[in-house]
Image: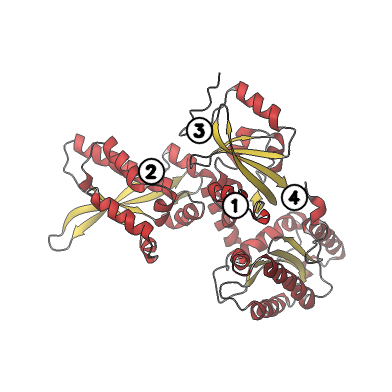
Amino acid sequence: MCRDNDVSNTPVSLTAETKARLHAAYDSLPGIFLFRTDGTEELVFANRDALALYQCESFDALRGKVGTTFSHFLLPDDYLPLAELARRSAGKDVSRRFYNYEYRTALGHLRRMEITLRQGTDACLGPLYYMTLIGADTCRSAYETDALTGLPGMHAFFRAAVKHAERNLKNGTFLEEVPVYFNITNFRRLNTICGIAQGDECLRTVARLLSEHFPDRLIGRLAADNFALLAGSGDVQARISAVCAAFNNYIQTPGIELKAGIRFYDTAKGADEIFSHAFDEAKLACISIKDDANHCWAVYTEEMGAQYAIRHYIREHFEEALQKGYIKVYYQPIIRTLTRKVCGTEALARWDSPMHGLLSPADFISVLEETHLIHKLDAYVIDRVCHHLRQRRDDGRPDVPVSVNLSRLDFSLGNPLEIVEDIVQKYELPRDLLCIEITENALVRDDDLIKNGIKAFRASGY
């Protein structure tokens, strides 16, 4: 008898019988993930090959070190909701049935994955997303020489780059070559607007420009719209600027630009360790200017690494912070000017991390928005606020209305009115104690989603 199907709102817990059945069915296949279809995108199963791709020895280790929902298993810029990926996979366009993304393993290594997705139903677990994972090693031959550009592919490039570093270290010239990472901003939009053929021509143009401006240098196409090279350290910025200018003159499409990140070295000491992360760090520098129209290159700094570590920590530990109460709600008084008396408070979230101390919203709000987890934070804050208001009433203290914020993503990821109503009814509170505020960036876009959401709140008495 199945006992695993009623798990929609609880951490995954499969019976030994179900685990054995799933492993027997899937461990002989390439990587397999099973995710819930209830909107949580929670991972409920990973086969042996999937664990290996993320360098984890067990399912518990995977959930503990990498994450529990789909957004944890890829870089934020590559995230798309599973419902959208499923819709693409079911479409007639075969080229859109495969999705390519970058991910970081439990050991911190940056890798690339290709996936396909379908929906199905398990007898015990109910409706599920079935995801097939194709790691870079599985299709290694595709990465030896890139058929589109003629450049070395990912594996060939990195093997050659390691040999370059070893040779330079032996010759005392390690500091004379620097890793550079290139990316085309909003490349997916180019494919959507102009078509796949134009996108392919764009990639060939980047390869040609890099070869022209960096002759006799090691250049590779890593995947998608990502390129890398080892450049001479003396004039690298000038050459990058020339490449980017030539590309932008070719593409002439606002918002689609070529950007680069550079990883300079201060010392050859510990070269092996430095070089093993160098292209990842060059990528961080590139990402730091993806929305900066005034700069086409950036140099990696330790501050970038620290910021990435914080953002990674936030993604990995958010669920834990909610469960263990590390995210706390503080109340900022609202003073009426005429009477100079408190007329309400505003709820503010702060993350009291055991590892990093007190994190402000500036540290974690943007990360939660990028990973589509912000609605969970807002629901948590509203629950804590209503609990606080209930306690005040029970203690006989006067009511003080509290303002709480909702973002646009709350409306696109769920039904915020339904969530608020459930919480208010749970604590048996009058609606006028909760003041719903919509963040300013949500109101910038004039769409029916927000308008209808506000009307619904007002009609319900908020």
Using the rendered image of the protein, determine whether residue 108 is visible from the camera's viewpoint. Answer: no
* 190 w.r.t. 74: above or below: below
Q: Amino acid at mark 3?
A: Pro
Q: Residue at x 80, y 51 (%)?
A: 140
Residue 265 drawn at (x, y percent):
71, 65
Name which residue lies at 31% across and 39% down: 422
Q: Between marks 3 and 2, how big is the CA–CA gap?
A: 17 Å
Residue type marked 1: Arg
Which quarter of the rendering shows the N terminus?
top right
Q: Amino acid at mark 2?
A: Tyr
> Which residue is label 1 attached to?
88
Q: Mark 3, residues whose alpha carbon is within 10 Å: few (<14), some, or many (≥20)? A: few
| SS at circle 2 | helix
- Mark 3 or mark 4, earlier in chain: 3
Crowding at mark 4 (Cα within 10 Å: few <14, some 14-19, many 20+): some
CB under 8 Å between discs 3 and 2: no
Say whether disc 1 or disc 2 marks the residue closer to the N-terminus: 1
Mark toward the start of the polypeptide (4 vs 1): 1
Front label number (4 vs 1): 1
* Residue extending farthest front: 92
Q: Height in image: 433 above or below 239?
A: above
**Secondary structure type for disc 3:** loop
> Height in image: 27 above or below 332?
above
Label 2: few (<14), some or many (≥20) within 10 Å? Answer: some
Q: Earlier in the sequence, mark 4 or mark 2?
A: 4
Alpha carbons under labels 4 and 1: distance apart: 22 Å
Query: From what the image shows, is residue 319 above or below residue 303?
Result: above
Q: Disc 4 designates what residue?
A: 136
**Residue marked by disc 3:** 11
Q: Are the two marked residues, 3 and 4, in contact with CB atoms closer than 8 angstroms? A: no
Question: Identity of the amino acid at label 4?
Answer: Ala
Q: Residue at x 34, y 46 (%)?
A: 329
